[in-house]
Image (spheres, grey):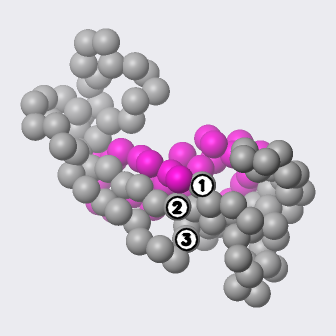
């Protein structure tokens, strides 16, 4: 599973017309939310007072580096990625963390699509 599309690298402005993005071969770190208060409310998606709307909520958290390749062919040839993008997500069901990572990635790079 991966994403492809045109994008501009955030760190140096390099345009990649046929970029390919995928979860790296490195580990995805999954941990339980460190908060012990109101965990039921967090799990149900209820935001506490003054919690910004862009703060993800969930029982668990996942963090991984996503590799950005110039093309899918570069990735298939095991070339080095041209960029690595940190993705952090929160979720409530252990079966959904990969999906959540790709959802976040699509928000970070809206010009990409599933491939």
**Residue 87 magenta:** yes
**Depicted 86 relative to depicted 107: above or below:** below
For the residues labelled 3 and 2, say whether their Cβ atoms are less than 8 Å apart. Answer: yes
Say which element carries label 1. strand
Position of residue 106 measured from the top left corner of the image (x, y, whole percent): 63, 47
User: Which structural element holds mark 3?
Assistant: loop
User: Which residue appears at 23% of the width and 33% of the height?
Assistant: 42
**Magenta stretch bounds:** 86-115
Location of residue 93 with respect to 10 vertically, above or below = below
The Cα–Cα distance between marks 3 and 2, rounded to whole angstroms, is 6 Å
Other residues around mark 1 within 10 Å, as few (<14) / some (14–19) / many (≥20): some
Are the residues at dot 2 and dot 1 in contact (C-beta closer than 8 Å)? yes
Q: Earlier in the sequence, mark 1 or mark 3?
A: 3
| Residue 21 left/right relative to 91 | right
Task: Identify the mark at residue 24; answer none if there is no mark.
Answer: 3
Residue bearing mark 1: 85
Mark 2 neighbour density, 10 Å: few (under 14) some (14–19) many (20 or more): many
């Amino acid at each position: 599973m991966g994403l492809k599309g045109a994008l501009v690298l955030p760190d140096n402005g390099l345009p990649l017309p046929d970029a390919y993005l995928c979860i790296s071969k490195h580990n995805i770190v999954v941990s339980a939310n460190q908060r012990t208060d109101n965990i039921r409310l967090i799990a149900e998606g209820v935001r506490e007072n003054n919690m910004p709307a862009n703060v993800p909520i969930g029982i668990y958290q996942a963090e991984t580096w996503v590799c950005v390749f110039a093309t899918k062919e570069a990735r298939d040839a095991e070339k080095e990625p041209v960029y690595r993008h940190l993705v952090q997500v929160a979720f409530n069901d252990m079966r959904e963390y990969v999906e959540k990572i790709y959802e976040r990635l699509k928000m970070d790079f809206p010009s990409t699509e599933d491939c």
